[in-house]
Image (cartoon, rainbow, N blue to C red):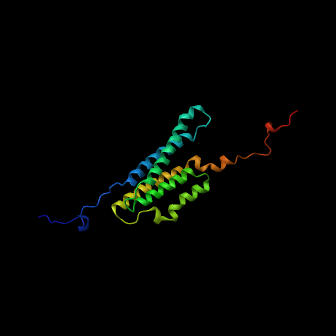
Amino acid sequence: MAVQTPTIPLCLSEAAPSFRPTPVTIQFGAVTRDLSAYIEAERDLEHCDSWDPACDAWIRDAEQSRARVLDGISALRKAPNRRHEDLPLQRYANLAQLLIESDCPEQVRDILALPDRFPHLFRCAGDSPVARRADLMVAAFQQHLRVLATLSDFTGMVEAEDPAIEPDAPNLMLAPAA
């Protein structure tokens, strides 16, 4: 005869609370999708010249993607917090805005270091399904931020601002008139 052996612990036989989206989580998902589109638009621009008329559409797409991300972050800031797990999502969105609007590599480095310096502000405490789901959303968003920081717009800021002029190079524009 068969012997009945329970395979599920008694504490897990209760229905687990499901993850219910809040306005913040819904908007955070939209910002994540917009950020992904922005990254792709910026990647399209990495190998084209800004003065090339063939790249005008790509430049326009990148500008529109950037505006969509920043508008989404603004909407996320205005969304009401319904639970404690919404706070890290809003903080990561703020980091994304700071990263997009940064103007030097040192700022980018400091912005990306904030979650490691203050993990209690950027992670959800607890082991609940809601906290785990929010942490998964944060982990995916953090990957997008790291990819964004590797784009040439963020890594080549110093070189773009300070062009090196070699003193031995002939400069025909400054030659005295004969």
How many marks the image carries: the answer is: 0
Q: Quadrant of residue 165?
A: top right
Q: Position of residue 132 (x, y in %)?
A: 37, 60
Q: Position of residue 15 (x, y in %)?
A: 24, 61
Quadrant into which the C terminus falls: top right
Q: Position of residue 73 (x, y in %)?
A: 47, 51
Q: Is residue 19 left or right of residue 33?
A: left
- At a point 44% along the width and 49% down the height, the residue shown is 31
Closer-to-camera residue (136/76): 76
Can you name the residue that lies furthest to the bottom here?
10
Quadrant into which the N terminus falls: bottom left
Q: Is residue 123 left or right of residue 103?
A: left
Rendered position, 71 above or below 120: above
Q: Quadrant of residue 20?
A: bottom left
Closer-to-camera residue (98/10): 98
Rendered position, 63 above or below 107: above
Can you name the residue that lies furthest to the left here?
1
- At a point 42% along the width and 52% down the height, the residue shown is 28
